[in-house]
Amino acid sequence: MPTRGQFTSTSSRIARAGICLLAACGFCRTSLAGESTGAATASPIEHLVVIFQENVSFDHYFATYPVALNPKGEPSFSAADDTPSVNGLGNLINGQPQGVLLTNNPNASNTANGSNAI
């Protein structure tokens, strides 16, 4: 039966070998990831990932886009002429909701919602 010292030594060796193997696999994968076969881009940025907090809406982050405030001292932003509107929530007109999500909410017909869920 192996002693505690032999067991610890063997476990340590296995762990170190595993770490070396993972590091080697990561190195191979990283070096291959740098080879791009796609079309050239105008900037080195090829992808942009936006991570939203849970239960925080798109409008919470981007409500002013494409009509930014452009405060003094800050870089100004002007949307391109063909930029689509992202105002899917809608507006109040004469006190009544007008817009895609306010008047045609797909959750309203979900039978799993309670009677006052919307």
Image (spheres, rainbow, N blue to C red):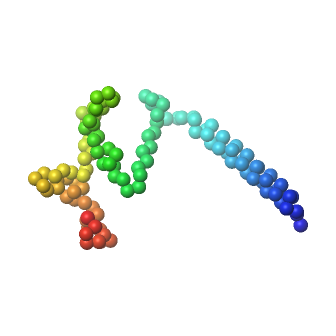
Residue 8 is left or right of residue 36, and the answer is right
> Residue 23 placed where, x, y %?
69, 44
Residue 43 is left or right of residue 12, and the answer is left
> Residue 49 placed where, x, y %?
44, 43
Q: Tell me: residue 84, above or below residue 76.
A: below
* Quarter containing the N terminus: bottom right
> Residue 56 placed where, x, y %?
36, 53
Q: Which residue is drawn at 25% across and 60% down?
A: 105
Q: In which quarter of the image is residue 36?
A: top right
Frontmost residue, 101 versus 3: 3
Q: Residue at x 24, y 33 (%)?
A: 81
* Quarter containing the C terminus: bottom left
Q: Tell me: residue 17, above or below residue 106.
A: above
Mark count: 0
Residue 17 is left or right of residue 43, and the answer is right
Q: Which residue is drawn at 22% across and 57% down?
A: 102
Q: Tell me: residue 83, above or below residue 14.
A: above
Residue 35 is left or right of residue 103, and the answer is right
Q: Tell me: residue 29, above or below residue 77.
A: below
Frontmost residue, 111 versus 55: 55
> Residue 48 placed where, x, y %?
44, 40
